[in-house]
Amino acid sequence: MKFFQRLFNRQPKETAECPRCLGKGHVNRDDIKRLGQELRWLPGKCAYCKGTGRVDVQMIGKVAVDEAYLTANLPTGERELLFAGDLGAMRRKEMVKAESEKLITKIRILHFEQNHSAEEIADILIGPYMIAPRGFDVQNFRNEFISYIKRVIHEAD
């Protein structure tokens, strides 16, 4: 009986409009630009509010609204660890940030200092003969990566 009492007598959590997507449930290019994540995010479902447009007020401030590591494809367990301030999650967040910065720097060096095209950079970084699991669309991945490389180059101009 106590189970049903706890289930039905819960106090609703106080929520607020999501500061990342501004209540839309998804981030668009304007949100991405406002948060300074042009080279790290694409438009899509908001990872801060999980697409609802509202967040528990106690969540706000635990993770920065512009945290690049908090994406829609971050596993639920890792998301919970990040909001809880878990040291392992914080280390992984910093590692991903460092790797992302290294990739952006490498692309810029290959283009601006060594005069490689976006296609050549893709071949250098992922290799011309990428081994992938069955069903993985290598050509589509390569095309998306080339598009990303062009964005990195364009942002630096």
Image (cartoon, rainbow, N blue to C red):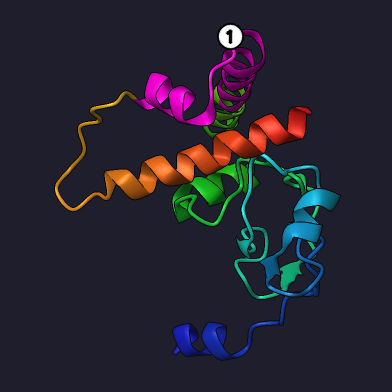
Assign the N terminus to one quadrant of the image: bottom left
At label 1, which amino acid type do we have?
Gln
Q: Position of residue 10 (x, y in %)?
A: 64, 83
- Judging by the rendered image, the residue that carries numbered circle 1 is 114
Q: Residue at x 62, y 53 (%)?
A: 42
Residue at position x 43%, y 45% from top?
143
Q: Quadrant of residue 115?
A: top right
Task: Identify the secondary structure beneath mark 1.
Answer: loop
Task: Look at the image and give the residue range highlighted in magenta.
Answer: 100-126
Q: Is residue 104 magenta?
A: yes
Q: Residue furthest right?
A: 34
Give coordinates of residue 69: x percent, y percent: 60, 40
Using residue 126 as the reference point, say whether residue 59 is left or right of it: right
Between 7 and 143, the one nearer to me in the picture: 143
Q: Main secondary structure of the magenta part?
A: helix
User: Which residue sits furthest left?
Assistant: 134
Left or right: residue 54 versus residue 5 is: right
